[in-house]
Amino acid sequence: MKQAPPKKIVQNNANLFEKLRIPPLVEYTAELGFLLPNKNLRLFVQDHHKNPGGTIKDWRARRILDQIGFNLKINRLVIVTAGNAGYSARMFFPEKEVVCVVDEKTNGKITKKLEKVHAKVLKLDLSTKLHSKEEIVKFVAKKLGDENKKAMEISSGFHDAYKPLLKSITREIRWFRRKEIPKQTAIHVVFPIGSGEVATGFISSLDDENMRLVAVSPSENPSIADKLNGKNRLYENYLSYYFQFKGSPLQWLRIGENEIFNACWEVNALKTLKSEESAAIAFAALPKIEAKEGDTIVVVNTGWGIRA
C-alpha cells in the first residue's frame, strides 16, 4: 500500500509557494563584525532559513513547479542528492513520489532524515562514473519495480532559480542603499558551493563589475557536492573555468572543520539566524575574504534543512 505523505506537509503545501519571498538584506556588522578581516567593512545577510522549507533549495523547487506545473502525468521526481534539494522537493511536492539517489557511502543520519519526510532513498555507487538522467531514472524504476511510472529527473538544470537572488542583492545595495554605500564600493557575496548549482546561477547572472563571488567548501573534502561522496558533480566543469584564471569574479575558498563548527555556534547563538554546518561555512570564510577597507560583504545563509 502506498504510504501517504505526512499530514503536516500536505496541510502546509498549499501556501508554501505563495510564502516564498526573496529575503531582504539585514545588516549584521555589529553582531558578527568580529568575523570580518578588518573593522572597516559592512556585513549583510540574505537569510534563507526563513523560507517556507527553511532552505535556499526552496527556490529550485519553485522553478521545478514552473516547468512541470501541476502535471498529473508526472508522479515521480528523481534526484541525485544527499541533502536539502531532496528535502525541499519533498516538502513542496507531497502529492508526488520523491526518490533521492545517494552515494552508497552517504551518512546514515542524512538518509534517515530524508526518509523521515517520506522521501524514498536509494543508494548507488556514484564514485565511478557520471550517470546520465536516463540511467538514474532506469535505476530507480528497476529498484522499485514499477517501470511504467512517469518520472522526471531533477538533479540539475535549475540553476536559473538562483539568478533573482543575486539580482536582488545588487538592486538593494546599488539602489535602495545608494545614499549610504558609494556606487564604486566592492561587494563580496559569500555562499557555500554545495553542488555548484547556486554558484552557476550566480555567475551566469553577474552584471556588476564591482561584485565578487566567493564560493566556500570544506578543506577536508575540497570537492563540489562533497555530500555525494562521488564524481556526480554536474556543474564542476562549468565552474572550473572561472576558478582558473586570474582576476576571475568567482573565488573558491576552503575552510577547516573546526572553523566551520565555531562559526556555526556563533551564528546560531544570535537566535535571529539559523544555519546548519553546511550553510555556516560561508560565515566561517569571512576572516579569509580578500576585502579592502570600505567594502561590503553579503553572506547568503542557505538555511537549515538536512543535517548530518
Image: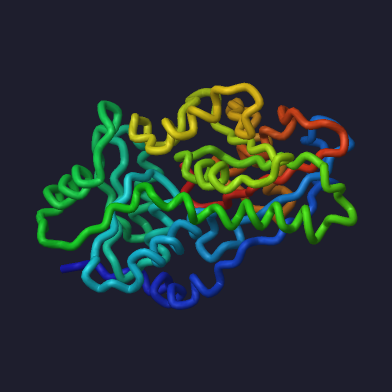
Q: Quadrant of the image for the N terminus?
A: bottom left
User: At 29% from the left edge and 45% from the top edge, which residue is drawn?
Assistant: 101
User: At 38% from the left edge and 44% from the top edge, which residue is drawn?
Assistant: 82
In the image, 282 versus 108, the foreground residue is 282
User: At 37% from the left edge and 61% from the top edge, which residue is drawn?
Assistant: 90
**Residue 77, relative to residue 123: is it above or below?**
below
Q: Position of residue 297 (x, y in %)?
A: 75, 42
Position of 124 with respect to 14 (left or right) is left
In the image, 250 versus 300, the foreground residue is 250
- Here the colouring is rainbow
Position of 116 with respect to 140 (left or right) is right
Position of 47 with respect to 144 (left or right) is right
Q: Position of residue 293 (x, y in %)?
A: 87, 33
**Residue 304, relative to residue 73: is it above or below?**
above
Figure label count: 0
Q: Position of residue 77 (x, y in %)?
A: 29, 58
Q: Position of residue 292 (x, y in %)?
A: 83, 31
User: At 50% from the left edge and 28% from the top edge, which residue is drawn?
Assistant: 241
Quadrant for residue 291, please give it: top right
Quadrant for residue 280, please give it: top right
